[in-house]
C-alpha cells in the first residue's frame, strides 16, 4: 500500500508541476537595433517550416503533428486553420505562383 501512495504522490506532484508550465516562453534574443520579435500565435504546436503566400497567409508545417496550418491576419488578429493533416513528417513548405508545395519524408 505504501508503494501505491508514494507513486500517487509523485504522479500528482509531476502533474501539478507541468500543468502550470507555460506552453512557450520567449527566450532572450539579442537583435540588431531597429529589429523586434514577437510570438505570432501559440496555436501551431511544433512549427517547423514556413512560407508566405501571395495574399499574406503564412503556411506552417509541423513534423510531429503531421499537419500544415494556414495563418491569416498576420498583421492584425491571426486566425489559424488546419489545411492538411495525416501527413508523414511534413518538413518543408514552399509557395510559388499561387501553389503551395509540402515536402514529406517520402514525397512532395
Image (tube, rainbow, N blue to C red):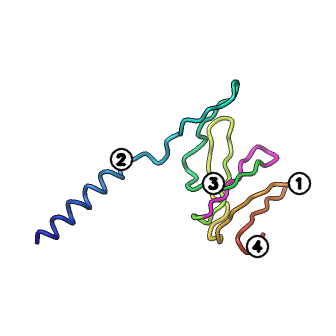
Q: Which of marks 1 and 3 is in front?
A: 1
Residue 18 located left or right of residue 77: left
| Crowd band around label 1 with a 10 angstrom C-alpha radius: few (<14), some (14–19), many (20+) | few
First in residue order: circle 3 vs circle 2: 2
User: Sequence order check: which comes first, mark 4 or mark 2?
Assistant: 2
Say which of 80 and 65 sits in front.
Answer: 65
Give me the C-alpha separation between circle 1 and circle 2: 44 Å
Provide residue 68's location: percent of width, then percent of height: 66, 60
As helix, strand or loop, the secondary structure at mark 1 comes to loop
Region in magenta: 53-63
Task: From the image, tell me which residue sits under label 4.
Answer: 107
Q: Quadrant of residue 65?
A: bottom right
Q: Is residue 59 a member of the stretch shown in magenta?
A: yes
As for residue 100 lying within the magenta part, the answer is no
Q: Name the image quarter holding residue 93.
A: bottom right
Residue designated by label 3: 81
Q: Is residue 108 left or right of residue 8?
A: right
Q: How far apart are marks 4 and 3 (CA)?
A: 23 Å
Q: Earlier in the sequence, mark 1 or mark 2?
A: 2
Q: How crowded is mark 4: few (under 14 residues within 10 Å), some or many (20 or more)?
A: few
For the residues marked 4 and 1, what is the alpha-carbon distance in whole angstroms? 20 Å
Foreground: disc 4 or disc 3: 4
In terms of secondary structure, where does tag 4 sit?
loop
Amino acid at each position: 500500500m505504501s508503494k501505491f501512495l508514494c507513486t500517487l504522490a509523485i504522479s500528482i506532484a509531476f502533474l501539478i508541476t507541468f500543468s502550470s508550465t507555460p506552453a512557450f516562453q520567449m527566450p532572450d534574443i539579442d537583435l540588431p537595433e531597429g529589429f523586434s520579435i514577437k510570438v505570432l500565435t501559440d496555436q501551431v504546436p511544433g512549427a517547423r517550416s514556413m512560407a508566405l503566400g501571395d495574399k499574406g497567409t503564412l503556411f506552417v508545417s509541423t513534423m510531429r503533428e503531421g499537419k500544415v496550418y494556414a495563418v491569416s491576419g498576420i498583421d492584425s488578429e491571426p486566425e489559424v486553420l488546419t489545411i492538411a493533416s495525416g501527413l508523414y513528417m511534413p518538413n518543408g513548405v514552399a509557395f510559388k505562383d499561387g501553389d503551395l508545395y509540402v515536402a514529406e519524408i517520402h514525397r512532395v
